[in-house]
Image: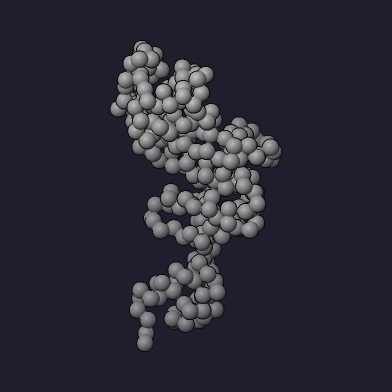
Amino acid sequence: MDKTLEDVQLDFAIALLNIKAEQGLLVSLVGDEAKNRKRVAFYRDNLRQMWNRVLASAYPVLRELLGGDFFLTLSREYGAADPARSGDLNRFGSRMAELLEAWPPTATYRYLADVARLEWLVHRAHFAADAVTQSPEQWAQCTRETLENSSIRLHPSVELLHTSTSAADLWLAARNSRENLEPRDCERPQWMVVVRPLWIPEVVVVSPNAFAMLRALRNGAAMGDALDAALARDSNFDFERNWQVWVNYGMVVSS
């Protein structure tokens, strides 16, 4: 029985992802088989180049850590394992950390998956919704009592991430240095916030207690309750200093 157009299209998609499945497509195509094979290879190469470009845009630090040639191999591995399912290619690459943890060539380098987790959140922050934030001067007019009784939430671009390796240090080093990035002393946990002041994503390292307080606010806790919990964890928690950092980076907005 002749294949339907839908069947041939499915064979074509499978052949692009898996060269070993190519013959199942070629038998359905008219014309010279050798020429058809070259045409399919042309489409496959274009697809792989697209994977590399899109993933390199989302994961520039990861690419720098791995080198361009190895990253190209990684992009092909990722594209075959988790093909794009949306016409919006900004969504492609969301499971990179999972692949890095499972893929034998990278599985033993834990910091790579953590860097990927951070870079994906930075990538998401680029496209997050906006919200009106008050200036530091406006926030300064609020007393601590006023803040504790206010409804405070996090800016839509804010992402919270805790990693078992120093992913934030690697990201910041890559952004601030033009030299080759060499990971050193990576086996330190970090708590970090991704935020987008002036439309440019930034990564801010915070204390575990500050991170917990921000997470409580993200989960809907009242400001006073979140602060009480932070002080219960550490009576020396410097709220004023942390609050100033949050305000300066535009992490918080009033509901």
Q: Is residue 94 above or below residue 40?
A: above
Residue drawn at x 49%, y 52% is 95
Residue at far left of view: 255
Q: Is residue 231 left or right of residue 69?
A: left
How many numbered circles are shown?
Answer: 0
x and y percent of residue 241 in the render?
A: 49, 18
Color style of the picture: one colour
Q: Is residue 188 visible?
A: yes
Residue 200 in picture, x, y percent from top left: 46, 32
Please report the residue visible at 52 percent of the width from the left and 41 percent of the height from the top. 118
**In which quarter of the view is residue 140 placed?**
top left
Residue 156 is at least partly visible in this image: no
The vertical placement of 95 against 31, above or below, is above
Establish if 97 lies above or below 219. Answer: below
Q: Is residue 174 above or below residue 225?
A: below
Residue 111, given in percent of the width and then of the height, sits at 61, 44
- Which part of the image, by quadrant, shows the C terminus? top left
Q: Residue at x 35, y 37 (%)?
A: 129
